[in-house]
């Protein structure tokens, strides 16, 4: 592609993206293709890779024809499912610049600015979220919270076994055991399988029935029982804002247990971490100074497009000691006074992700971020009230931050049907979870463009669908 074509296509692409995001609420949120439909179309229109290169116009027209119908519109203001992956224009520009510069920031020497901007923006986040000051110069960008949790667990494991696991494997090192709550994200269990701990050695500590937060006394009991049985407790992953209901584990109490027992404490704040930008939401971080590591996802709620997880480890030499591998071809002249982020995560190569976060932080400013976070939370408070005011519904968990969990009163199948009616309707998209064994809808309000009008429309839609479900139930 010559640079003239690139310019023209690029300008048109920016126009397309701008238009797409402005119009994001107009399409059915959930893609309406059947499984295999996109693939069948691709295979029938072009069964083999083209022998000779094609014109850009031909390529682009297939984006519109084949790809777009199979897109679920995550940026729709009516996307309330899972947790969001919200984005913003400055973030997209950061992603574009990163692609344009095309650097691999694996070593300081392979792009000093990539490393040093990353240090800088993660220090900004320490200040912005009022994180413990020992997280300064101890942060690294990971792709996802799952990777961050895995890195934390690997460090905890190596520290616990005197840095021997990487050398001799784990079989002689005892049944290493880790702890999380029964509400924790599945990435903790996945990390345990990948780190060689084994799913069977993950303890899911019981949570409080109402708050759904880990019960510290249960944690202490479980650790004691495991020690008595000759097991080796090494790691606790606490959650600041669970995926199901945004519940927050009591970090102070858990941290004290970890200190006493010599266990690594990791705190997973994937979604909720962004809210720490607001002083009024910092109570959930009480005790975070006892954590060995912490992560959250600017790619969920901080207007930074997927993917970007921010991860901190107290005394990051432990991370380097766990991850570092130094073949001859990666040795550089510059030694210990620089950071080589390849030793701070699992892959070798790394994208220049710090740019988009830098753009976002500078574009919005902390005031701007606080404004949007508060707006989302106040919309969730309004939705919570709407749920309370409708006798047919009940709240399934205390609302926390911008997540509202609710269901139809009565048997579970009503709520399941309601979810399906809502999602096939196309106007909006939400997902479900189970709380206390019961099916529950969860509606997370954190999209860049969601406003009061959208929440009112969404609630009207939910009520219309509820009418249908309950009507057909009685006839
Ligand atoms: C979303 C979420 C994760 C996983 O995030 P990824 O970045 O996709 O790995 C982990 N923990 C919690 C609490 C989450 O909400």
Image (cartoon, rainbow, N blue to C red):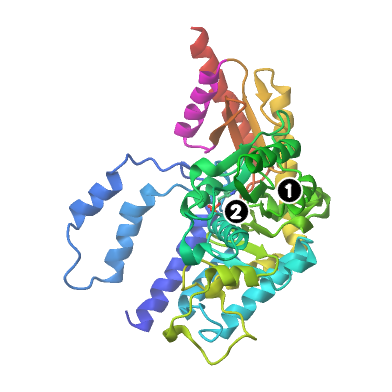
In percent of the image, x 50 and y 84: which residue is there?
A: 110
Calculate the distance from the C-alpha at mark 2 to the C-alpha at mark 1.
16 Å
Q: Which residues are magenta?
A: 411-430
Q: Is residue 22 magenta?
A: no
Q: Position of residue 85 (x, y in %)?
A: 56, 53
Q: Nearer the viewer, residue 288 or 5?
A: 288
As drawn, the label of residue 300 is 2
- Residue 55 position, x and y percent, is 26, 71
Residue visible at 53% across and 81% down in the picture:
107
Where is residue 192? Give x, y as percent. Answer: 52, 50
Give the main secondary structure of the magenta stretch.
Answer: helix
Q: Please tell me whether residue 337 is drawn above or below residue 122 in the rendered image.
A: below
Q: Which residue is mark 1?
A: 375
Q: Position of residue 262 (x, y in %)?
A: 71, 55
Report the residue at 49% width, 23% height from top. 417
The answer to whether residue 428 is magenta is: yes
Q: Residues within 10 Å of mark 1 (few under 14, many from 20)?
A: some
Q: Is residue 414 above or below residue 2?
A: above
Q: Is residue 151 in view from this perspective?
A: yes
* Residue density around tag 2, few if under 14, some if 14–19, many if 20 or more, within 10 Å: many
Q: Can I make out residue 365 in this image? A: no
Q: Nearer the viewer, mark 2 or mark 1?
A: 2
Q: Which mark is residue 309?
A: none
């Amino acid at each position: 592609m010559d640079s003239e074509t690139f310019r023209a296509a690029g300008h048109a692409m920016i126009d397309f993206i701008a238009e797409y995001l402005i119009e994001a609420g107009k399409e059915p949120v959930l893609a309406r293709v059947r499984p295999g439909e996109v693939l069948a179309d691709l295979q029938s229109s072009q069964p083999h890779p083209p022998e000779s290169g094609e014109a850009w116009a031909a390529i682009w027209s297939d984006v519109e024809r084949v790809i777009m119908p199979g897109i679920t519109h995550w940026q729709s203001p009516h996307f309330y499912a899972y947790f969001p992956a919200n984005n913003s224009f400055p973030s997209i520009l950061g992603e574009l610049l990163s692609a344009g510069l095309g650097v691999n920031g694996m070593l300081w020497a392979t792009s000093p600015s990539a490393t040093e901007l990353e240090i800088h923006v993660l220090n900004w986040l320490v200040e912005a979220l009022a994180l413990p000051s020992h997280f300064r110069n101890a942060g690294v960008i990971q792709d996802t919270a799952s990777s961050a949790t895995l890195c934390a667990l690997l460090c905890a494991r190596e520290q616990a076994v005197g840095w021997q696991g990487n050398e001799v494997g784990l079989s002689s090192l005892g049944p290493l055991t880790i702890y999380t709550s029964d509400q924790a994200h599945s990435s903790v269990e996945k990390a345990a399988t990948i780190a060689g701990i084994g799913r069977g050695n993950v303890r899911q500590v019981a949570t409080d029935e109402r708050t759904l937060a880990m019960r510290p006394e249960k944690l202490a009991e479980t650790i004691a029982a495991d020690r008595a049985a000759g097991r080796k407790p090494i790691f606790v992953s606490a959650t600041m804002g669970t995926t199901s209901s945004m519940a927050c584990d009591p970090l102070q109490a858990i941290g004290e247990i970890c200190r006493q027992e010599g266990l690594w404490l990791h705190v997973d704040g994937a979604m909720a971490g962004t809210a720490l930008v607001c002083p009024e939401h910092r109570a959930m971080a009480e005790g975070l100074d006892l954590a060995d590591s912490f992560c959250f996802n600017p790619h969920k709620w901080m207007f930074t497009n997927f993917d970007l997880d921010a991860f901190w480890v107290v005394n990051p030499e432990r991370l380097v000691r766990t991850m570092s591998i130094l073949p001859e071809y990666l040795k550089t002249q510059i030694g210990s006074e620089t950071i080589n982020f390849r030793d701070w995560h699992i892959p070798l190569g790394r994208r220049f992700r710090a740019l988009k976060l830098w753009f976002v932080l500078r574009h919005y400013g902390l005031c701007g971020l606080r404004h949007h976070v508060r707006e989302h939370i106040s919309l969730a408070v309004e939705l919570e009230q709407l749920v309370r005011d409708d006798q047919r519904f009940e709240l399934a968990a205390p609302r926390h931050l911008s997540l509202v969990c609710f269901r139809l009163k009565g048997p579970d199948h009503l709520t399941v049907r309601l979810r399906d009616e809502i999602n096939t309707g196309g106007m909006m998209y939400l997902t479900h979870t189970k709380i206390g064994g019961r099916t529950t809808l969860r509606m997370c309000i954190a999209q860049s463009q969601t406003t009061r009008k959208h929440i009112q429309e969404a609630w009207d839609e939910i009520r219309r669908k509820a009418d249908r479900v309950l009507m057909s139930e009685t006839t």
